[in-house]
Amino acid sequence: MKNKKYLMEYIGTVIFLLFGYIVMYLNRRNVELSSSLQEQIFSRYFTPVALGLSYVLIYYCFAKKTGAHFNPAVSFAYFLNGKLKGKEFLGYCIAQFLGSLTVFMCLKKIFKILDWEYTYKRNVAISDLSNIIGIHKLLMAALIELILSFILIMIFLSVSEAKNKYSGIIIGLGIMITHIVSNEYAFSGMNPARAIVGIIYDVTLEEPVYLKYIMEQSIFIVVPFIGAFIAVLLHEVLKSKAMAEFIGTAIYMFMAIEIALQWFDRLQNISSKDWYGYRNGMEMFYILLVAFAFGISFIVMHYSFGRISGGHFNPITSLVLCIDKQIGKIQCLKYVIAQIFGAICGTGIVYVIRYVLGRKDIFTIIDDGRVSFEYAMVANNLVNINGHVLGGLLAEIFMGFVIVLVILVFGKKDKDYIGFIIGMTYIILHIFGIPYTLASMNPARSIGSAVVGAFAGANKAIEELWIFILGPLVGALLAVLIYKILFAKEDCEE
């Protein structure tokens, strides 16, 4: 039986990596050969989507038998928390290593047959540190790999413990968004098996491989295990509902804001090249990507931490559920405090990473005390509506009203689906609200952005903060009133 587990883990690793990395190399080849800026930008997101979707499909084939790890760091986490014995952990790691080795051997053969090797320096470069600039390159690579590995392992541990029928989908979405964040820095995989075999593959190429390169790549072997260790430690003490709200909000803010900043950087580059024809179309894609980043990040965090705290990550959600007597007043206060500090923490991590990397251009003053960092953090922005306070306030009231009404109407009836429903609602409201206020609808998020933005020099972030606190709160209270009038009797009858 155990041998079958190892064989399944091997086969799953082969399918998962082969499917994902064929897509990655095809896209990287297209980027090298294409002169189209749009094609180059779109190609960056095909691989994360392919990896996420392929994991979902394979998960439901192998999860019941093996847990569908396909990653030594994930197996290490399960070994630490006692779900895998030592021999099983070793067997899983060997199966994953052999699966990864099989994939890269196949890719090498495919590249040779199709004569694709000329398109980039290293066909199977597991990680590319060229996007990380400055003297802190290795330190930042390790830090980013640590953060992303920690997030990914936390998702695995939390979702698997919940034993939800959507577990494969949630983990697949988690893989997708962590890889999107990674694309901006080192194209890392948070997977030691991939890293080890990638080094072996590069050594077999005709081009010389230097010790410095091997040392750099070893970061992506060692650090995921450290991230797994920290994730297990934190997961073991994650019994407090407020702590779950803090961690969930911090991860939610980090992932969504980082993805938003990636696209802000690209829009700036397009503008600097005066490619206005591209820019107009890419702005719409930017809105969609940011909307999906916040919606998907919420879905992943909700199903990861919802079993503990309910997965609010928004003070107006906690407030209305307190009014509806689903949580107590003291619990509500703890949630709100945890959410605010979580938002500050998540946003602050993004700030520190980008500041240390030397990307100080994102902190340039662009208009009347605002800085581009504030603009790109997808909150507290009236620039798009010429600083029109009433317009921004009305937009935030409307968005707060809609999200709370959805939570109240569907929260009791469709608990299995509520995370997806709220996440999709966030996506729709972001598409609506980004052109107006960059769609906050979350006082914790706005406070986090304002605190970090003010630290970066954005005076308006604090001055206009009241709009992004008052607006969602007023909308939430209106939603409670409408809900009581239209739906309360139906709930009582049921």
Image: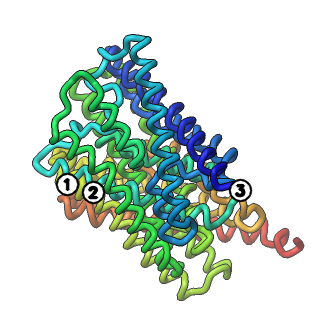
Residue type, numbered disc 3 = Lys
Q: CA distance from mark 1 to mark 3?
A: 39 Å
Residue type, numbered disc 2 = Leu
Q: Is residue 340 above or below residue 404?
A: below
Who comes first in sequence, dot 1 or dot 3?
1
User: Residue visible at 18% across and 46% down?
Assistant: 359
Q: Does residue 487 appear to the left or right of 26 in the view shown?
A: right
Residue placed under numbered mark 1 in the picture: 139
**SS type, badge 3:** loop
Query: Marks 1 and 2: CB-CB under 8 Å?
Result: yes
Q: CA distance from mark 3 to mark 2?
A: 33 Å
The percent position of residue 232, horizontal first and vertical second, equals: 45, 69
**SS type, badge 1:** helix
Residue placed under numbered mark 3 in the picture: 165
Report the disc number at residue 143: 2
Compare residues 70 and 316 and report the one nearer the observer.
70
